Amino acid sequence: MAINLEKGQREPISAPKFTVGLGWDSNSSATGEAFDMDASVFILGDNGKLLSDSHFVFYNNLKSPDQSVIHSGDNTTGDGDGDDEKILVDLSKISGDATEISFVVTIHKAQERRQNFGQIRNSFIRIVDGSSNTELVKYELDEDFSIETAVQFGRIYKRNNEWKFEAVGNGMKGGLQDYLTKYN
């Protein structure tokens, strides 16, 4: 049985291999443009910064150098039910220097298309055990991010050699470049 988390809640992750599924639906928008949401992953060290440029995993860099994080590719429409983008994680392969894996979703060309997360509904992040295909945790973002164009959905972090998932749900008015600046 999956554990439904509230913002800020943490839960240990015991499965070494799992899939992080991210999903969303767009509301009817007066912008006249389709929404192209992009999931990105930042693999960070103790200092809260990227281990290297190659540890930024997104639609143009689908794999981390150690193959511990693999992005399934860009879904440009978000159509359909279930996960819109998937990230495969294998903690047994991750660099010993890694202490956090941050999951961020941004809206491609948000400023240009006058789009924001207030026009998005049914947003979630979930972790599915890789061996049993069982949903372990799920966090449904229920806030109205009416000016935000980027949201950190969740993070997996290591404390005392134990990996935990935290439901974050923090928005930012800005885009992917703002997160790159934060984590570089």
Image (cartoon, helix red, strand yellow):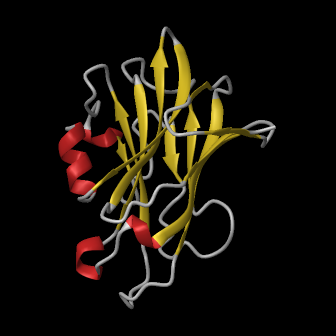
Residue 18 location in percent, x, y? 65, 38
- Determine the image quadrant of residue 147: bottom left
Q: Is any part of residue 129 visible from this angle?
A: no
Residue 24 location in percent, x, y? 55, 64
* Above/below status of 104 relative to 123: above
Q: Residue at x 33, y 70 (%)?
A: 108
Q: Is any part of residue 13 visible from this angle?
A: yes
- Determine the image quadrant of residue 130: top right
Left or right for 58, reference 174: right
Q: Residue at x 55, y 31 (%)?
A: 9
* Above/below status of 183 relative to 95: below
Left or right for 68, reference 107: right
Residue 7 or residue 129, whichever sits in front: 7
The mark tally for this picture is 0
Q: Residue at x 26, y 35 (%)?
A: 52
Q: Residue at x 24, y 38 (%)?
A: 183
* Above/below status of 55 relative to 75: above
Residue 17 location in percent, x, y? 65, 33
- Determine the image quadrant of residue 177: bottom left
Q: Identify the image quadrant of the C terminus.
A: top left
Residue 131 location in percent, x, y? 77, 36
Q: Residue furthest top?
A: 160
Q: Identify the image quadrant of the N terminus.
A: top right
